[in-house]
Image (cartoon, rainbow, N blue to C red):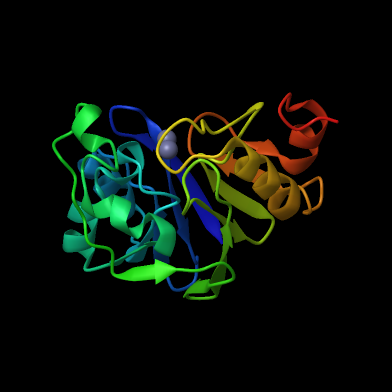
Amino acid sequence: MKHKRLPLGIYQANCYIVWDEQSRKAVVIDPGGDFEELKTFIENNGLNVEYIILTHGHGDHIGAAAEAKEYYNAKIMIHADDYEMLKKSDKNYSSQMGYKRIEIEADKKLAHGDIIKVGNVSLEIIHTPGHTKGSICIKCENKIFSGDTLFAGSIGRTDLEGGSFNNIITSINEKLLIFPDNTEVYPGHGPSTTIGTEKKYNPFLRG
Ligand SMILES: [Zn+2]
Ligand SMILES: [Zn+2]
């Protein structure tokens, strides 16, 4: 399995491309905008995009999802609890973020424990409500793509619709910090980290 981080869109949310080196089949996680940049990377690496997985429904993570879906004939997937958010620009906040209004119909509703396969690579869906009701993290080998749930030294905001501070803390403690300390974490914004580093130094999680 290989992966690449591309900060995209006006908020520079991290888009991750994950692929199977043998079959060149790929998944795009959170294409937040700048489709041409994404397309160039995909072309230069000879990848075949099969799925677009959204860690949650916010505008800064979904800006290029519709274009990517159409261009690659790929399926858009989002947790069932954020499904409605994708369809309404006032719920996904795109109408307030300086984007054109984004209103997308997803092809598949995800649930906790779902496994998405691309070639020999398996991605496991972990439901981590708190930032939004349908926020997910995606685990692949020793890597977790954490969306806006867990950041290096911080956690996602919980003051938007569907947010809950108690839920995000419970999600992180019970569903992320259970993995080994050397598990790599790739957040939706900013640099990567590890589970061990966050356990030790994240001010929201210590004690
Ligand atoms: Zn968000
Ligand atoms: Zn975000």
- Count the numbered circles shown: 0
Q: Position of residue 199 (x, y in %)?
A: 79, 36
State left or right for residue 191 relative to residue 132.
right
Residue beneath the point at 33% across and 60% down = 46
Quadrant into which the N terminus falls: bottom right
Residue beneath the point at 30% across and 46% down = 62
Answer with the quarter of the image where residue 201 lies: top right
Residue furthest out toward the left: 100
Q: Position of residue 52 (x, y in %)?
A: 35, 60
Q: Position of residue 17 (x, y in %)?
A: 43, 52
* Between 207 and 1, the one nearer to me in the picture: 207
Residue beneath the point at 54% across and 33% down = 156
State left or right for residue 177 relative to residue 73.
right
Q: Quick check: 130 above or below 29?
A: above
Q: Quick check: 1 above or below 205?
A: below
Residue 149 appearing in the image: yes
Quadrant into which the C terminus falls: top right
Q: Position of residue 36 (x, y in %)?
A: 21, 42
Residue furthest out toward the right: 207
- Rendering quadrant holding ligand 2: top left
Answer with the quarter of the image where residue 78 lies: bottom left
* Between 58 and 144, the one nearer to me in the picture: 58
Residue 24 appearing in the image: no
* Between 184 and 195, the one nearer to me in the picture: 195
* Between 167 and 193, the one nearer to me in the picture: 167
Residue beneath the point at 36% across and 55% down = 45
Q: Quick check: 49 above or below 119?
A: above
State left or right for residue 76 relative to residue 174.
left
